[in-house]
Amino acid sequence: MSEENGVIYRISGPVVTAVGISPRMYEVVRVGDEGLMGEVIELHGDQSVIQVYEETSGVRPGEPVIRTGQTLSVQLGPGLLTKIYDGIQRPLPELEKTMGVFIKRGVDADGLDLGKNWDFKATAKPGDSVSSGDIIGTVQETKTIEHRVMMPPGKSGVIKNINSGEFNVTQTVCTLEDGTEVQMMQKWPVRTPRPFTKKHAPEVPLQTGQRILDFLFPLAKGGTAGIPGPFGSGKTVTQQQLAKWSDADIVVYIGCGERGNEMTEVLDEFPHLIDPKTGEALMNRTTMIANTSNMPVAAREASVYTGITIAEYFRDMGYDVALMADSTSRWAEAMREISSRLEEMPGEEGYPAYLSSRLAEFYERAGRVETLSGGDGSVSVIGAVSPPGGDISEPVSQGTLRIVKVFWGLDAGLARQRHFPAINWLNSYSLYPPSLDQWYRDNIKSDFPEIRTEISALLQVEAELQEIVQLVGSDALPVDQQLTLEVARMIREYFLQQNAFHDVDTYTDLKLQYTMAKAILSFQEESKKALAGGAALEDVVNVPARTDLMRGRFESGYADKIEELLDNMNKQIADTMEAN
Amino acid sequence: MTGKEYRTITDVKGPLVFLNKTEPVAFGEIVELRLTDGTLKNGQVLDTSDDQVIVQVFEGTASIDKQTGIKFLGDVFKLPVSTDMIGRILDGAGRPRDGGPAIVADEKADIIGAAINPYSRQSPDTFIQTGISAIDACTSLVRGQKLPIFSASGLPHNDIALQIARQAKLVDSDDDFVVVFCAMGITAEEYNFFVHDLERTGALENACLFVNLADDPAVERLITPRLALTAAEYLAFEKDYHVLVIYTDMTNYCESLRQIGAAREEVPGRRGYPGYMYTDLAMLYERAGLVKGKKGSITQFPILTMPGDDITHPIPDLSGYITEGQIVISRELHQKGIYPPINVLPSLSRLMNAGIGDGKTREDHKSVSDQLYAAYAQGRELRGLVAIVGEDALNERDLQLLKFADIFENKFLRQSRDEERSINEGTLDYAWELLANIDTKYLVRLDQKWIDKYHPTEKKV
């Protein structure tokens, strides 16, 4: 089979040209004497252009190139959770075992532990007619997550034989009438979206416990969000908060081209995090992909696909999955780098002309769907963008903004004032509220959307007033406008600012968010009354009970106390009238 | 195949030599060029195929002609490493520059360096006291961090780097740092300044210098930092040293990168810099950190001068995305005569929170830092307002903050070049003393319990 084996013709960094093989596009090949993993990205006459996922120095022309016949795929099955992978699904702890602390090359490692036995419980029975995506059994993969074993895509028929018991992922657990054998592990090419029956409208919010996000700029389950942030604006912390607190069943975290030390912080921190819903380790429902900036660029390019394929796989089981990609700019830069090695004609700022279509394809893999088995699952994608110099007019930010429905505009200026999360409430937006409002009315309070509107309107008014204050100082404003400024300040300091590192303040559920927002509006209303009754503004805003109300959010059990604190404040405000 | 000498040069372009050859040459392989007059030059393979090999020549292509003989040495670039390197001055290609003997190698290490498995890294969390209040209080450095100095022409970044190199120490430990200093394209004058200062303070004995000066070949600058980091990795991860790597000036390095890119007719990215500059810089900066199970550490202080004081220029911008914060030097403060002119507002240490607080520095560190920052930021903003409406329009609180901004710059930031302030008494207590100029009711970032404990006039003893 001479066409299965070729030789290297040329090497230029991560791009290798081979002759003597005629592979398919995106087929995985083994390059050189060390068998480095590569992927075919261009066919050019009798030459095949390959991007290599590992460092190529020392490789020579004339070394062999071997076809594998497969496209870049991931192994899917029990054992994905709690794992930490590199960009091409090699488990990092395994790599450490085989090659020490530095990542050397030519080492292959399975994504799943093929030797491990799992307790498979059949839920289908002989005689059942099953098709692609149907759930045939379950495995308790971690303490909190039940892995639903599905019929691999493309396989269907009537079950002849199915057994519960201890199996590893490559053993046959089910046989069909036509002799087809089904294992727990399936493989799926990462660049192809997994199939589903149909996409639903985004009608359920993804709750994150982050007040500014949930209340003002909500993301729907199955939705897409972009976080562009200049460096130093707290983007990473915001993403970590989302991973920790969002009410998704499964979290897939892709550290794409980011800092080693920060990735380590995530890797160190995650295993210690407790899932607030179950009291178990958060890692039990998390898969992480870590491809730091100095790891091979081609693997960085692949990492987002690896991540979203894993996310889709859990979605197909009927889970809500939150996928964080930090950062998609690094992914785009990897595309740019490879494109320039291919000497492709560049588009804007050297990025390849297909940049925006690749971004769109990626985000389009998000969504809330009816799965093949008739269940309901979702993949929500939260992509960080790191625009150079914080200038979001650059191609990656623009390409992203055209697609995503939520924009959380991190602001270095706010970060500098130590306002965290440093999300600018004036330029951020969410297009989901119209489709989510019914949910809020049904599940939280019937006037939830109206309260939200009032809060954002106050912030808008403040921005306008601030311009005047900049010129003439706040004392020159009429009393009612000074009160508005005070209310807006309360929104900012009490509601929008949230301390990610504080045990209690780090998470606020939607009901409490609503109550807090109501408390602010109540302060405004009572103060107005008091002012009309002759109270002095200074007395009104300085009532001690307001500080108690605001500080109270740092104490546990705040939800039970807030009504009482609010009553106290209202009473004290009313008392200011009598003082005068 | 070593030993065979090719005379098949077809083109010479800028720092690149193109040749046809007959045998397979490895990507990244080291090349020796013998000029017709007998001079030897070194190079490295940038692109290799059956038909053509492109070699980048470190010492420049001057005098190379088509008769030049080229020998492929059969290996990628390796640096002989040994603890004997400490106390030595080497040139940009790793050869002795101080007249001393060649380094006797314990081993030879590949200068490209492999990526550290993120799973094998250890989170940096040990505070390094630099003795400079602005850094210690507001952008605390921790061991294993990479914290660049963003400066610009005409600012005293070198003094600051040297002061850090001299004073850096751990609070509760005698562990000393070994300094690996890497000069890329700096002037002889700057170099002499560094060497003189290191000699004066005796730090040279604990340092290893890799020097590529402004009149040395520009292409050599691409390997100089890799040599320095290879030496640093050896010292840190094989020999348990704590290594402080200072390299200057990253801007010159990036210029060389652009030069090579242009000569290869690559598609340029922003401002003509190659599209792979991010990855290239990452492969330097990411060679900092701590590794599980190893005692040593690498802490990096890259210095870069921002062209036109522009922080959005690709060099500071891409650096900022890889490094864990930055220390920004301000021309405005420098012109006011303040040393060190560190503008704490855009400065940041991303690993600060891991390295400060109870048991590391002091329990009130975070609050004090936040308060200093907030008060100074507001004070500076008020300066703008005062310029329009005058001080009379300010209320009591604003007046105090305005005054505090001056106090902060003139007392807290300002210190002499050899003044070493300890973190607790020298920096944090001093910060409290200065913050006492503001009424406690305006010090909203300070917890009451810290006020009770540390405020110079209001503490409850």
Image (cartoon, coloured by chain):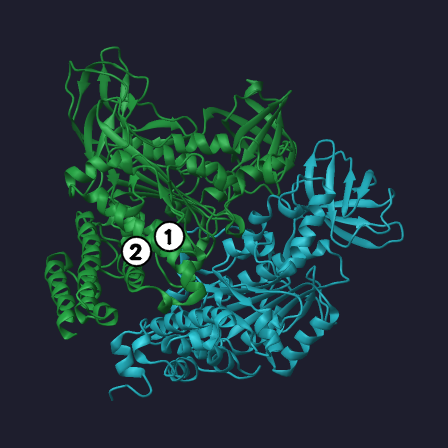
Q: Nearer the viewer, residue B261 or B75?
A: B261
In-image side of B187 versus A154 (left or right): right
Residue farthest to the top, as pictured: A178
Q: Amino acid at mark 1?
A: Ile
Chain coloured cyan in this rendering: B
Q: Which colour is chain A painted?
A: green
- Examine the image and state in which quarter residue A348 appears: top right
Residue that mark 1 sits on: A423
Q: Is residue B131 visible?
A: no
Category of crowding for the residue at label 2, using alpha-carbon neighbours closer than 10 angstroms: few (below 14), some (14–19), many (at least 20) = many
- Side of B49 relative to B286 (left or right): right
Q: Position of residue A67 (x, y in %)?
A: 52, 25
Instruction: Note whether A216 is above or below A549 in the view shown.
Output: above
Left or right: B447 as drawn, with respect to A226: left
Subunit of label 2: A
Q: Residues within 10 Å of mark 1 (few under 14, many from 20)?
A: many
The residues bearing labels 2 and 1 have C-alpha atoms spaced at a distance of: 9 Å
Q: Which residue occupies the foreground of this view, B336 or B260?
A: B336
Q: Return the residue nearer the eye: B153 or B181.
A: B153
The kind of secondary structure element at disc 1 is loop
Residue annotated with mark 2: A496
- Compared with B394, B310 (above or below) is above
Residue lying at 22% horizontally and 47% vertically, measured from the top left: A451
